[in-house]
């Protein structure tokens, strides 16, 4: 029987689970929408990842819970913050990583790493949705692009518009007035992204920009935003194939280490 | 001042309050609280502290009419007022009490409804909200006859006290302490000491009493001794394991803030110091299994003292030092009977909040070294700008200089509407994880081969 361990990342929008083998390779994973029933959703995600790995709960040597719902997972053997897990996951995928930018549903963070995924310093958004996945969700809803559509739309922009606010509520009214002024959706989306990239670059500067850098979290799939952040910081970001899973992967790697 | 009020005050001081507190003590003695296994034995002095502060606020309400009452800022030369026989109330301490009792948003809302911005200092909003509505958890504050403020801690104080002066129609005495870049010029210190000397005339006029130089000397000496004892109390936390935590220190700070210059303050700290020295002698730990020693920057988060203190302890972390608690032990040694005016100017003009960033950095580096702190927690207080601005530079410079880990948590000293417990806990938890250094998984990640994704 191979040794397996798992990480479950209960986020505000999605819940992710990753199962790794003894060498820290990802052998199963899942991503489900979060519900108010965190423990059940966590279990559902874990079962799906185990199913993909062709394994059962009993075969797991340890399970690390992370994300804002980490404290309520009854099956987790240990809880670790998403900061430590994202650092570990990113360093696992891209060894030598020195900077991780993670934009999740309800918070965004910049993490400076030392060797082997060690967290040297980090900064997070304050008590505000500005610069988070929720902010983009609200913008996508107003502009009817769908979350996945934001990146491609933004790339089509030809005209530079200015958004002054990253406050989710104020930005939404700003977007609505830009629509009313007859501005195109791609230009508005691009302006939203630029405002957010500016906000994120401020966060990164708090810990210091560095390379190699990794962008994790679902927002990393937004090509327009990643490009704007790269321009703002003059840093090139590597984006994993499944950036949403970085935290869960880090948790699984930590679980494998704890036995 | 009426004779009736004076008699009533004396009766309450000598008979009424001691009796009420005796009954309260008996009632509480019957209640046995289970000991929190995360902590060492609770400090026995806590009972005396509670009595002392209850007596202070209890007597305050009878002071009105019996003696002149002044509302004073934390960094003002109160010694002068005591020499003139004022009963002093500290709005900042009252604000902290409101914060700890979790009533700040309710009282702040009274000021906000009157047009004061939610971005204004929450101590100021509590004080003004109280003045407008009478709301307070301490029963009743005496109406002031005089307002006495020093702008060494911030400039907000000035406008806040001006508002009070307008609302109550009473005089305001301001001591202006210019912000210091580098070492103070002689002319600056002369300017400060000159103002203090000039206040004597104003106070003689307001109270109708002649200045008593011998009485000022007594008060100055008491103030110096009280602050010195407070410094010694804090210094016990240099011991490993620390006999108390910074969260205890936040609570036991009240007398040196509010009762400085009075014998009760000295007596209280003599008792507390003896208890702590005994703990040091016997190696009694405030947090058994102390692993990390942390320094705290900025005012306490009064409404979250207990949960935060527990969260630190759960992670083997002990707060052992703080810039805030240290402030009342930092400059009082300047107080000197031979040069009352100049020494008060130094004691109050040279405090760290009135000095440049380099001074603050050197001070923090010194404290971190003296207390062997291996991490720094910076509370960015939403409504205390002068203390919070510059913290990101401070953390960067200090971590470069000392190689220590730092974390910033966003909160407010009293207004919990500006606080997200979940976010603060996540930041602290990640910080605690990083303090553990070579965590369980780090070795596995470095050693294991293959790509994860």
Image (cartoon, coloured by chain):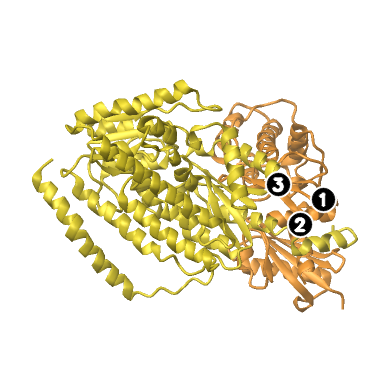
Chain colours: A orange, B yellow
Farthest-out residue, top: B187
Farthest-out residue, right: B450
Is mark 1 in CB contact (under 8 Å) with mark 3?
no
Q: Residue at x 33, y 48 (%)?
A: B259
Q: Nearer the viewer, residue B27 or B243?
A: B243
Q: Residue at x 57, y 68 (%)?
A: B288
Is mark 1 in CB contact (under 8 Å) with mark 2?
yes
What's the CA distance linking mark 1 and mark 2? 9 Å
Chain designation of label 2: A
Which percent across, then down, holds residue B138?
Answer: 29, 53
Residue that badge 2 annotates: A245
Q: Is residue B31 left or right of residue A37?
A: left
Q: Is residue B250 left or right of residue B425?
A: left
Farthest-out residue, front: B338
Question: In the rendering, which numbered label is found on residue B267?
Answer: none
Which percent across, then down, holds residue B280?
Answer: 52, 63
Q: Is residue B201 left or right of residue A36?
A: left
What's the CA distance linking mark 3 and mark 2? 32 Å
Pair 3/2: label in front: 3
Which percent across, then down, holds residue A173?
Answer: 55, 35
Question: In terms of secondary structure, where does tag 2 sit?
Answer: helix
For disc 3, the neighbor class at 10 Å (few under 14, some 14 to 19, many from 20) is few
Residue that badge 3 annotates: B403
Do tags 1 and 2 sit on the same chain? Answer: yes
Chain designation of label 1: A
Residue that badge 1 annotates: A240
Do tags 1 and 3 sit on the same chain? Answer: no
Question: Eyeballing the image, is B189 above or below B214?
Answer: above
Question: In terms of secondary structure, where does tag 1 sit?
Answer: loop
């Amino acid at each position: 029987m191979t040794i397996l361990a798992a990480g479950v990342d209960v986020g505000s929008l999605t819940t992710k689970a990753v199962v790794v083998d003894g060498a820290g390779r990802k052998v199963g994973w899942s991503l489900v929408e979060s519900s108010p029933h965190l423990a059940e959703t966590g279990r559902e995600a874990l079962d799906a990842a185990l199913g993909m790995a062709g394994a059962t709960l009993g075969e797991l040597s340890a399970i690390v819970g992370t994300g804002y719902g980490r404290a309520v997972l009854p099956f987790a053997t240990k809880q670790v913050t998403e900061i430590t897990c994202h650092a570990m996951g990113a360093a696992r995928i891209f060894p030598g990583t020195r900077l991780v930018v993670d934009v999740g549903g309800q918070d965004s963070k910049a993490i400076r790493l030392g060797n082997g995924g060690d967290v040297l310093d980090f900064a997070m958004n304050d008590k505000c949705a500005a610069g988070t996945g929720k902010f983009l969700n609200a913008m996508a809803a107003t502009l009817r692009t769908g979350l996945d559509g934001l990146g491609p739309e933004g790339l089509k922009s030809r005209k530079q518009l200015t958004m002054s606010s990253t406050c989710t509520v104020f930005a939404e009214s700003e977007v609505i007035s830009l629509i009313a002024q007859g501005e195109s959706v791609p230009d508005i989306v691009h302006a939203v992204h630029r405002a957010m990239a500016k906000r994120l670059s401020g966060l990164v500067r708090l810990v210091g920009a560095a390379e190699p850098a990794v962008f994790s979290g679902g927002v990393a799939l937004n090509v327009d935003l990643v490009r704007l952040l790269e321009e703002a910081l003059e840093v090139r970001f590597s984006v994993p194939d499944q950036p949403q899973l970085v935290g869960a992967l880090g948790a699984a790697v930590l679980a494998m280490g704890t036995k | 001042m009426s004779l009736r009020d004076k008699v009533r005050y004396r009766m309450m001081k000598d008979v009424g309050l001691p009796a009420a507190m005796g009954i309260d003590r008996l009632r509480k003695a019957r209640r046995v609280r289970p000991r929190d296994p995360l902590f060492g034995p609770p400090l026995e002095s806590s009972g005396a502290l509670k009595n002392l502060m209850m007596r202070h606020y209890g007597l305050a309400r009878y002071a009105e009419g019996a003696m002149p009452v002044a509302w004073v800022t934390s960094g003002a030369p109160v010694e002068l007022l005591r020499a003139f026989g004022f009963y002093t109330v500290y709005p900042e301490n009252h604000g902290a009490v409101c914060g700890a009792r979790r009533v700040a948003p309710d009282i702040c809302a009274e000021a906000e409804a009157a047009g004061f911005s939610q971005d204004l200092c929450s101590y100021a909003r509590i004080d003004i909200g109280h003045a407008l509505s009478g709301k307070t958890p301490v029963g009743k504050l005496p109406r002031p006859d005089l307002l006495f403020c020093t702008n060494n801690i911030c400039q907000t104080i000035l406008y806040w006290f001006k508002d009070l002066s307008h609302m109550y129609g009473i005089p305001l005495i301001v001591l202006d302490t210019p912000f210091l870049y580098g070492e103070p010029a002689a002319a600056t210190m002369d300017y400060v000491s000159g103002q203090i000397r000039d206040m004597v005339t104003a106070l003689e006029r307001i109270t109708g009493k002649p200045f008593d130089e011998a009485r000022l000397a007594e008060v100055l000496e008491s103030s110096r001794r009280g602050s010195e004892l407070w410094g010694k109390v804090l210094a016990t936390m240099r011991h490993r394991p620390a006999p108390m935590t910074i969260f205890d220190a936040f609570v036991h700070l009240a007398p040196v803030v509010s009762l400085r210059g009075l014998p009760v303050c000295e007596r209280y700290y003599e008792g507390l110091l003896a208890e702590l020295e005994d703990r040091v002698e016997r190696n009694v730990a405030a947090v058994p299994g102390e692993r990390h020693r942390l320094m705290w920057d900025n005012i306490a988060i009064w409404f979250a003292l207990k949960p935060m203190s527990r969260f630190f302890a759960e992670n083997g972390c002990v707060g052992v030092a703080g810039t805030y608690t240290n402030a009342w032990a930092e400059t009082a040694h300047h107080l000197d009977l031979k040069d009352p005016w100049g020494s008060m100017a130094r004691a109050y003009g040279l405090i760290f909040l009135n000095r440049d960033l380099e001074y603050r950095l050197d001070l923090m580096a010194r404290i971190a070294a003296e207390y062997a702190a291996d991490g720094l927690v910076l509370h960015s207080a939403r409504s205390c700008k002068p203390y919070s601005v510059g913290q990101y530079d401070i953390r960067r410079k200090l971590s470069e200089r000392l190689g220590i880990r730092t974390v910033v948590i966003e909160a407010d000293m009293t207004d919990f509407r500006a606080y997200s417990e979940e976010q603060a806990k996540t930041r602290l938890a990640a910080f605690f994880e990083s303090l553990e250094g070579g965590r369980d998984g780090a070795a596995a990640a470095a050693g294991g081969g293959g790509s994860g994704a």
